[in-house]
Image: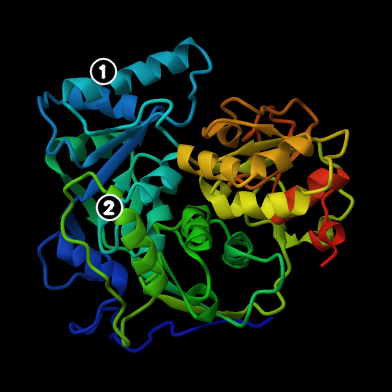
Amino acid sequence: MTFWRENRHPRGWHSAGTQDPISMNITEKILASRCGKDRVSPGQYVVADVDLCLGNDVTAPIAIEEFRKAGFESVFDNTRIALIPDHFTPNKDIKAAQLSATLRNFAREHDIVNYFEVGRVGIEHVLLPEQGMTGPGELIIGADSHTCTYGALGAFSTGVGSTDLAAAMATGKVWLRIPESLKFHYSGVLPEWVGGKDVILHTIARIGVDGALYKAMEFCGPIIENLPMDDRFTICNMAIEAGGKNGIIAPDDTTRAYWEEHAPARNHSALSVQFLASDADAGYAETYEWDLSSLAPQVAAPFLPSNAAPVDNYKDTEIDQVVIGSCTNGRLSDLRIAAEILKGHRTAPNVRTLIFPGSQEVYRRAMNEGLFDTFLDADCAISPPTCGPCLGGHMGILAAGERALSTTNRNFRGRMGHPESEVFLCNPAVAAASAVTGTITHPKDVAGK
């Protein structure tokens, strides 16, 4: 596997660090279009128009409080705000119920079209693309760090604080610093049981959790071109785990097919969708190139996503819980992979295996395809769509000394429960195989291929 850095002052950049005025990368093009400028450059501060802003049951109540403190009486557009109670829902306690009630009441007060009640809600970063509410070339902000997920569609999508969300709900605008961009070019063909989760864990391991601090992470190359949308969502979802301002993939035929399938469900009047690409001579702060033909399934050890290494490095590590789902790996293809491994097996007696479909639609399709039968036959517990254990919220909290293997995105100390518990991160195939054996296991050792 090769790794190198190049182009510290690549074509399109002057020695003083300014870009050639005729070239821009995709992130810069989107931001320029949303602030009414012909071009923008890294380091520039802009006020940009927002296509969609979203909040959940943890962050939106704070934004609503700030909205009211500021004296705002109306939202800028009731069709371009999404309120999604997904973290502690179904409500786990009185405090969670109050948070959800705050969203519900604000949505009623301002006639918010895109409020998703329990029974219709899903994990926000699975639900919104599925609903056709995030599109190529758009500027999307959310009071959730994993809002960078929608960059998989070729959007500029980033997490903001609750105060910024409050301002955006009132004005439809956001204040931004144009980020420098990093280019990640992946060549080769991915081996069996290796997917988008492994690509991004490998990337974070190489550059570190601050390796892309406030930078755009642009993913490209043959590996990306051959990945389905679900894997692209996974990659962009975890850009924030390297400190990235956003992750982004230029839209192609795969993107267009996904967009055309889901766009009819779109129910907000966004600005025009644009299928953009970086100019050939666009500037990047750095370019990374890897041949991933020999990449193994990755496992990230506690307590950072950057602690990733081949799965066999952790072989025979005992686990108490397996979590399959979340905004990172809770899509239908993820559940299909897990079911392929689990079919005909039962989970180890010492392991609790929890399945979290990312949305009601994923839940329904997985059920109709018979995946639930496979999970139930394997002694798995199936949850309604919720962020649940990912943030140590509910539906799978760890006790002191327990160890989980999870398809979620973070493994910080205490992330899934007790500060003396541990979380290892992996892809759905590794998670399912390990559920069967009770120890961290390569999928081929269970699937036989």
* Residue at 62% over, 35% down: 415
Q: Quadrant of the N terminus?
A: bottom right
Image quadrant where residue 384 sits = top right
In percent of width and height, residue 440 lies at 82, 50
In percent of width and height, residue 114 lies at 27, 35
Residue 371 visible to the viewer: yes
* Residue at 16% over, 65% down: 33
In percent of width and height, residue 363 lies at 54, 39
Determine crowd level at label 1: few under 14, some 14-19, many 20+ residues with C-alpha closer than 10 A. Answer: few
Along the line of sight, which residue is nearer the eye, 162 or 211? 162
Q: Earlier in the sequence, mark 1 or mark 2?
A: 1
258 on left or right of 430: left
230 on left or right of 280: right
179 on left or right of 303: left
Q: Quadrant of the C terminus?
A: bottom right
Distance between mark 1 and mark 2 Cα atoms: 28 Å
Are the residues flagged by discs 1 and 2 in contact, CB closer than 8 Å? Answer: no
The residue carrying mark 2 is: 264
Tell which residue pokes out farthest to the top in this image.
94
Determine crowd level at label 2: few under 14, some 14-19, many 20+ residues with C-alpha closer than 10 A. Answer: few
Give the numbered dot on residue 105.
1
SS type, badge 2: helix
